[in-house]
Image (cartoon, rainbow, N blue to C red):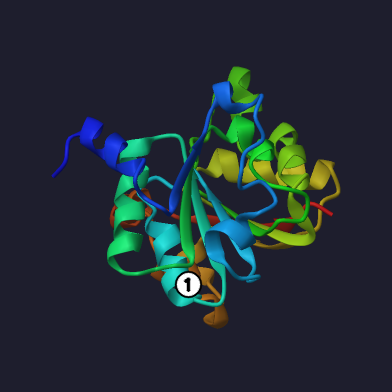
Amino acid sequence: MPSKQEKFKELDTFKNCFKFFFEDIPNAFKLKGKWHELMFENDHPIVLELGCGKGEYTIGLAQKHPEKNFIGLDVKGNRIWTGAKQAIDNKLYNVGFLRTRIDFIDHCFESNEVDEIWITFPDPQPQKTRERKRLTHMMFLNRYKKFLKADGLIHLKTDSTGFYEYTLEVIKENKLPLIWHTNHLYKNCPADRQELTSIKTYYEGLFTAKGEDIKYICFKLS
């Protein structure tokens, strides 16, 4: 297995992996508004996973939906390396990875460029003082709104009851369209949405092995 530094070096050679950091802000990100053209070379819908880790969910969705394009986003390069390498080895041309902070996400996508967003097992940031760091805080939702299509879906999967209830409250307070939610996904998963349980992130596998309930919310921003 390559070392962390070897992974970082190899990431720079992967054609399916890109990065954008604070020092890049003065310069326009080359793929902003051009993901279809320069990365995927098609006009298929783009699905973005936030905090993708090693890319298990991004890869799993891409394998099930070759008619869509998938981008996994994470700040940890050694994690992204795993998913990017797997996509290359398996010739998954509908998969890309972006190494950046979610704080910079609106610098990386143009208006109406993304069709769906997945937020899979984010840090729930349970302390009240860290509320603004929660990925379903309106500060973040307003960033997503800049590039998510008007009818685009946001999917949240979490093991945290507090984060699940917090997100439902944000949706209610801001009168956002709530499509469906459940506090026990593995008992209530619709027959036509088996991908919600058949694809698991690393952490989801740990949680379900312990018998913990997985929560799911699907909503829109407008």
* Secondary element type, mark 1: helix
90 relative to 101, above or below: below
Give the image location of residue 50, x and y in percent. Answer: 54, 46
Q: Would you say 34 lies left or right of 190 here?
A: right
The residue that label 1 is drawn on is 195
Give the image location of residue 215, x and y in percent. Answer: 53, 55
Query: Which residue of the protein is positioned furthest toward the top in this rendering?
Result: 129
Q: Give the residue at x 46% y 61%.
A: 95
Q: Nearer the viewer, residue 209 or 77?
A: 77
Locate the C terminus and report the quarter of the image it occupies: bottom right
Q: Which image quadrant is residue 91 in? A: bottom left
Q: Would you say 100 lies left or right of 3 here?
A: right
Q: Would you say 195 lies left or right of 182 here?
A: left
Q: Nearer the viewer, residue 187 or 70?
A: 70
Is residue 182 shown to the viewer in this render? Answer: no
Q: Give the residue at x 61% y 48%.
A: 31
Q: Which image quadrant is residue 198 in? A: bottom left
Give the image location of residue 101, x and y in percent. Answer: 54, 32
Q: Nearer the viewer, residue 70 or 126?
A: 70
Q: Nearer the viewer, residue 43 or 187?
A: 43
Locate the N terminus and report the quarter of the image it occupies: top left
182 relative to 188, above or below: above
Q: Give the residue at x 70% y 51%.
A: 33
Is residue 215 shown to the viewer in this render? Answer: yes
Give the image location of residue 216, x and y in percent. Answer: 57, 57
Q: Give the residue at x 57% y 71%.
A: 68
Report how many numbered discs are placed on residues in the image: 1
Check disc 1 and give the amino acid type: Glu
